[in-house]
Amino acid sequence: FRGKRDKERVVPLSTSAERTLNSYLQNQNRTSEWLFPNPMGAPISQHAVRKYTRGIAAKHPEFDKLSPHVLRHTFATMALRRGMDLKTLQALLGHESLDTTSRYLHPEIRDLKDAIDKVG
């Protein structure tokens, strides 16, 4: 798909996500070429996704700051904690610069301790 500044984005899926997506596609009466169409059959907008996450936050106070961007930051932090290298994460996020990728990372004391323990 196309992202910011009309840049082409490739979004690989985990095996589990691919299975879930295939199941979704098999169980849908699809009338649109879009994976997640709006009620008119056109692609959903960024605004619709933000509205959806705000709706979740309204029903669940523990997610009061939920947004698509928060989900992106959360993914980046979790990927780093699980051992993904920065260059791979940079590619997945579609950043040209590692400086941009580093803004998405939020290491906690636990992460720092784990890193020190790996060194010895």
Image (cartoon, rainbow, N blue to C red):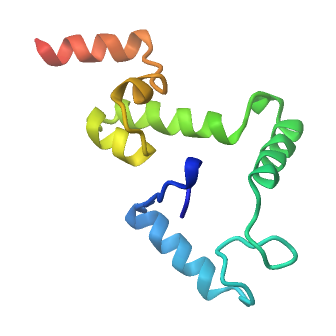
Instruction: Please identify the quarter of the rendering in which residue 36 is found.
Output: bottom right
Foreground pick, 97 / 37? 97
Looking at the picture, does residue 28 appear above or below residue 82?
below
Instruction: Please identify the quarter of the rendering in which residue 53 is found.
Output: top right
Foreground pick, 20 / 44? 44
Instruction: Please identify the quarter of the rendering in which residue 55 is found.
Output: top right
Quarter occupied by the N terminus? bottom right
In the drawing, does residue 88 fall left or right of residue 32? left
Residue 52 position within the rendered picture, expressed as x and y whole percent measured from the top left: 81, 50
Residue 109 position within the rendered picture, expressed as x and y whole percent measured from the top left: 41, 9
In the drawing, does residue 105 fall left or right of residue 120? right
Foreground pick, 79 / 42? 42
**Residue at image point 55% right, 73% down:** 21
**Residue at image point 76% right, 58% down:** 45
In the drawing, does residue 83 fall left or right of residue 12? left
Looking at the picture, does residue 45 appear above or below residue 63?
below
**Residue at image point 44% right, 43% down:** 93
